[in-house]
Amino acid sequence: MKTRHGAIAGRRSPAGGSATPPGADARARLRVATYNIHKGVRGLGPAKRLEIHHLGLGVQALDADLVALQEVRLFHHRDARRFDHTWFGWPEQGQAEFLAPQGYESAYRTNAVTRDGEHGNALLSRWPLGEVGHHDVSDHRFEQRGLLHVGVNWQGQTIHCIVAHFGLVHASRIRQAQRLGAYLKAEVPPDAPVLVAGDFNDWSERLDPAIAAHGLQRAVPPGATRSPLTFPSRLPLFALDRMYLRGLRCVGMTVPRGPSWARMSDHLPLIAELTLA
């Protein structure tokens, strides 16, 4: 197994050597990315390949203050054995810690436990993290789903960040949206800024009203009515990866594209520039 610094020598943070907050002109904007990393591997059978090292460079290139990640592994025994003797090897750290650029903090909580390992949601932050919580929103025994809740200290105030990965069935997603709303009501002050980011698996674009019922609006580029397409990564047709906001405003949104991004995961990352509303 390899450590991050042993595998990728000389890797720097997006800030250009240290992960300190950006300069005064940029401090009023919070740059946020959400990315489903497909557990750091791609392909099936003999063609299965390790992409976690490329993903590390990809996360660095996003240059985001916050990176919400889904399908993140803490460990997986079978894949670790398979890739341990490859050129870079399976990381010794959990994937959240491995992917965090130098100087960033990371938070991780497990959603799903399988025979050989587990996976969940993570948040990487250029800004100090507060208390980390987890809320199970599994709707049935075939899909283990959860919400990662992290308070981020941004310019002297707390932004409540929720990293989500909703289910594959529409009825499950509606119930998960209701549980998200109930969780926010119970755990987050009503006047606090909230960012909910993740993979919502909303193929039919029917989830927004259920989430809006709890005071959250989908982040879209200025002048647009929907967020950019992010899935599948080679030919995006669906806007599965999204951000929902309360007390924040989206002033810009982009999706990186190209062969490298298409290779690393079946999703493309979504990047947004946010300000306080």
Image (cartoon, helix red, strand yellow):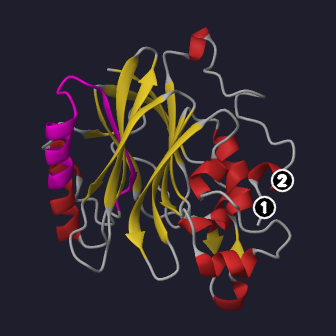
**Residue 122 picture location, percent across and down:** 48, 50
Q: How many marks?
A: 2
> Left or right: 257 with respect to 244?
right
Q: Secondary structure at mark 2?
A: helix
**Contact (Cβ within 8 Å) of mark 1 with mark 2:** yes
Residue extending farthest to the bottom is: 45
Q: Tell me if mark 2 has few (under 14), some (14-19) or many (20+) residues whose alpha carbon lies within 10 angstroms of its own.
A: few
Q: Tell me if mark 1 has few (under 14), some (14-19) or many (20+) residues whose alpha carbon lies within 10 angstroms of its own.
A: some
What span is in magenta? 178-200
**Residue 225 picture location, percent across and down:** 33, 43
At 44% from the left and 78% from the top, the residue drawn is 114
Residue 224 visible (yes or no): no
Q: Which of the 4 quarters of the picture holds residue 172?
A: bottom left
Q: Which residue is mark 2?
A: 6
Between 59 and 135, the residue placed more toward the observer is 135
Image: 196 above or below 275: below
- Amino acid beneath label 2: Gly
Query: Is 182 inside the magenta-drawn segment?
Result: yes
Residue 185 visible (yes or no): yes
**Residue 255 picture location, percent across and down:** 56, 47
Between 236 and 109, the residue placed more toward the observer is 109
Picture quarter with the N terminus: bottom right
Q: Which mark is residue 49?
A: none
Picture quarter with the C terminus: top left
* Label 1 – label 2 distance at C-alpha: 6 Å
Q: Which residue is mark 1?
A: 2
